[in-house]
């Protein structure tokens, strides 16, 4: 085969191959292991030298589908608990296929008014769902990390302007270190964003009142007061990845207002607490933040890659990311938004389409029901752990995270971390369910996240069953 122009009549047939594979694959997710390591060897069939002459459209797609549907980690299924990962609702998946089909150039209004309008629409819907003021600016990003880069770049711009510097044109040279304060719940992606922005990953200071990382408000206030009126950035965390715990956002908003600081809220998955009356109090105060981040490929259950960044003052976004000075990149006219002037990306796919599809399909009530079902699943898992004689619940059930460890009778404390680490490896190797380990209060723990739209109580019951089975084998050996 040669130039794809010669196979232009095969495009629909290639998509039909994917369509025909989709039904059996999706229908089988509930029954197949999350990952079968015995099938990893199939990936070799995708390797080898670059073909001189290709296999042709249908043959190439068929090979990728055959290998992929067998050797993939089936993270879109109901028993992938390893990271805070959702799945793809039926509407979101179809919306994502539509994004690939239409392949819009979304950075500029002139290249796709459709993509720009849909992004504006979904940002408005998300602000309404989260309880953010409609006046906030926003942009879709590939992830929460990119959303942090966006929000914290705006914070950096604001902070530098208070020192009389336009950091976009002049850089950070000559400026003092930007003070960034948070609790021990802060996520690594916040530090990574600071690293990317040249502010320093390890310059962030945390103030915790216990081993779990919960905020010490008095220590935070003392640090802000010690600045003597100089500007600072405060990061509040809504939904910790180990326990689902959250910072007191309203109280941190009070401190930020009192000391003239920028308040940035990391709501990667925790922002969805705002949807349920049972958890909405955790998000109270987020509407006072200067910048807010969240993920779509977590609790919204849209395909990778999907993040959101919201900023109180939309003009700061333009100052931080616009003004390219390139004649071929036109400014938008009245009512025309160029989203590549509001965030770090230039070339952008139409990631608003799957968001629009799932929000339109299921609405506010459908997503509230999903969130509350996941709250119930996490609570059910916590109850199973409390009832099991060889498991230990380490934190109350909050949001969609359950933190616990394997603790069989007779095993001394100094051997538990090693035992749980080996059990985590055994669980991933087994593949029936997927949940890795983390460290919480110095202990090796499991912290499965139950936020896939397919996940039910039966799936976490299997998780407990498999963990106890594998744990018994390890201790017996």
Image (tube, helix red, strand yellow):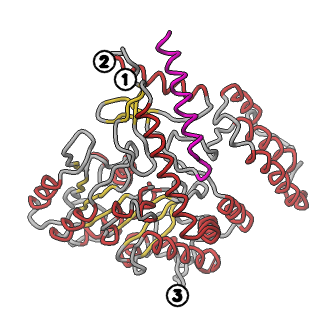
Q: Which residue is mark 3?
A: 335
Q: Are marks 2 and 3 in contact (CB under 8 Å)?
A: no
Mark 2 vs 3, N-terminal side? 3
Q: Identify the residue shown where x is 59% and y is 26%.
A: 429
Q: Secondary structure of the magenta portion, mostly? A: helix
Q: CA distance from mark 2 to mark 3?
A: 63 Å
| Residue holding disc 2 | 414
Give the side of residue 259 with respect to residue 394, left or right. left
Q: Position of residue 370 (x, y in %)?
A: 55, 58
Q: Is residue 460 magenta?
A: yes
In the image, is 73 to the left or to the right of 8? left
Question: From what the image shows, is residue 349 above or below residue 418?
Answer: below
10 Å neighbourhood of mark 3: few (<14), some, or many (≥20)?
A: few
Q: Position of residue 57 (x, y in %)?
A: 85, 50
Q: Tag on residue 417?
A: 1
Quarter where residue 157 is shown: bottom left
At 34% from the left and 40% from the top, the residue drawn is 395
Residue 288: quadrant of the picture: bottom left
Write down the region rendered in magenta: 453-477
Determine whether 354 is above or below 113 in the image.
Answer: above
Q: Tell me, yes or no, whether the highlighted magenta stretch contains residue 394.
A: no
Q: Secondary structure at mark 3?
A: loop
Q: Which is more N-terminal, label 1 or label 3?
A: 3
Q: Secondary structure at mark 2?
A: helix
Verify CB contact (< 8 Å) between mark 2 and mark 1: yes
Check residue 233 in the rendering and tell me which mark sits there, or answer none: none
The total of numbered circles placed on residues is 3
Front residue of this view, candidates 187 and 126: 126
Q: CA distance from mark 2 to mark 1?
A: 7 Å
């Amino acid at each position: 085969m040669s130039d794809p122009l010669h196979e232009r009549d095969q495009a629909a047939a290639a998509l039909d191959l994917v369509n025909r594979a989709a039904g059996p694959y999706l229908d089988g997710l509930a029954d197949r292991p999350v990952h079968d390591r015995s099938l990893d060897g199939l990936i070799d069939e995708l390797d080898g030298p670059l073909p001189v002459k290709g296999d042709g459209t249908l043959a190439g797609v068929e090979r990728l589908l055959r290998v992929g549907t067998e050797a993939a980690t089936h993270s879109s299924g109901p028993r992938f608990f390893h990271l805070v990962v959702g799945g793809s609702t039926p509407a979101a998946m179809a919306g994502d296929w539509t994004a690939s089909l239409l392949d819009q150039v979304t950075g500029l209004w002139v290249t796709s008014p459709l993509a720009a309008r849909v992004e504006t629409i979904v940002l408005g819907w998300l602000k309404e769902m989260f309880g953010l003021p409609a006046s906030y600016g926003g942009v879709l990003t590939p992830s929460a990390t990119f959303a942090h880069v966006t929000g914290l770049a705006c914070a950096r711009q604001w902070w530098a302007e208070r020192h009389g510097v336009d950091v976009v044109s002049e850089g950070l040279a000559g400026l003092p270190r930007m003070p960034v304060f948070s609790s021990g719940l802060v996520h690594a992606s916040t530090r990574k964003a600071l690293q990317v922005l040249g502010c320093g990953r390890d310059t962030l200071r945390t103030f915790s009142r216990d081993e779990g990382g919960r905020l010490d408000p008095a220590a935070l206030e003392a640090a802000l007061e010690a600045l003597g009126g100089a500007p600072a950035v405060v990061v509040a965390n809504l939904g910790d990845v180990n326990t689902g715990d959250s910072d007191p956002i309203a109280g941190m908003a009070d401190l930020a207002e009192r000391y003239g600081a920028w308040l940035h809220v990391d709501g990667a998955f925790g922002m969805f607490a705002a949807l349920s009356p049972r958890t909405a109090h955790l998000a109270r105060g987020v509407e006072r933040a200067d910048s807010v981040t969240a993920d779509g490929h977590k609790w919204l259950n849209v395909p990778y890659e999907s993040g959101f960044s919201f900023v109180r003052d939309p003009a700061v976004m333009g100052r931080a990311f616009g003004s390219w000075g390139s004649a071929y990149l036109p400014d938008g006219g009245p009512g025309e938004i160029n989203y590549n002037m509001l965030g770090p990306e230039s070339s952008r796919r139409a990631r608003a389409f799957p968001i629009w599809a799932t929000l339109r399909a299921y609405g506010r009530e459908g997503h509230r029901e999903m969130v509350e079902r996941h709250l119930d699943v996490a609570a059910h898992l916590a109850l199973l752990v409390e009832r099991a004689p060889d498991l230990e619940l380490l934190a109350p059930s909050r949001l969609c995270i359950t933190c616990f460890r394997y603790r069989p009778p007779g095993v001394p404390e100094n051997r538990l971390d090693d035992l749980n680490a080996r059990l985590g490896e055994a669980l991933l190797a087994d593949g029936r369910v997927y949940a890795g380990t983390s460290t919480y209060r110095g202990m090796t723990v499991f912290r499965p996240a139950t936020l896939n739209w397919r996940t039910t109580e039966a799936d976490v019951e299997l998780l407990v069953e498999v963990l106890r089975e594998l744990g018994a084998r390890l201790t017996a050996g």
